[in-house]
Amino acid sequence: MSQQFHKNGKDTSYGRVFRHENGLVCIYLADGVSLNLQKAQTLVEDVRAIDNSGKARLLVVQGVDNDLSFEAQRFLGTTKGLTHLALVVHSRFQTEVAQIFVKLINLLNSSYEMRVFHREKEAETWLLSKS
């Protein structure tokens, strides 16, 4: 998928990234996307292009059949520039994998707090309470 730029974000090979009017940076992952290290680096660059404050609050909504390589998990776990990450999952398997990622970022002493949610509205409410 080619990148299409929009006023507050863009469509990318991994999905859509944009700044919501409430200030959150949102990523909707496309179905079937595998995030390897290179795509994870691009994702972080895209987030920083939208919010370079060093205090981004990130809402990530998974698609169907997404996966994240260990290298990408490690990179994302040590990335600076975020304060909070809310991951919205849709299946039991995504929940289990996300919980492993939460444990990994805690082991890596990540600079941001991450939580897993099943409902987008709850994730958004949590992130907005962290402003």
Image (spheres, helix red, strand yellow):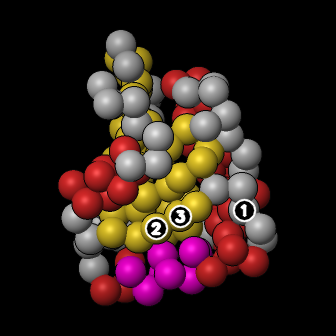
Q: Residues within 10 Å of mark 2 (few under 14, many from 20)?
A: some
**Magenta extent:** 95-102
Q: Quadrant of the N terminus?
A: top left
- The one nearer the camera, 70 or 60, is 60
Residue 41: image location, x then y, percent: 67, 45
Query: Please, is residue 124 above or below residue 65 in the view?
Result: above
Residue shown at the point (77%, 68%) measured from the top left: 109
Q: Are marks 1 and 3 in contact (CB under 8 Å)?
A: yes
Residue at the spot x=41%, y=70% of the render?
116
The type of residue carrying mark 2 is Arg
Give neighbour class at mark 1: few <14, some 14-19, many 20+ (Cα, 10 Å): some
Which of the two residues, 88 or 110, is positioned nearer the viewer here? 110
Mark 3 sits on what residue?
114
Residue identified by numbered label 1: 110
State the residue in front, 129 or 100: 129
Q: Which of the labelled discs sits on residue 115, or is there none?
A: 2
Q: Position of residue 79 (x, y in %)?
A: 72, 50
Determine the CA span between mark 1 and mark 3. 9 Å
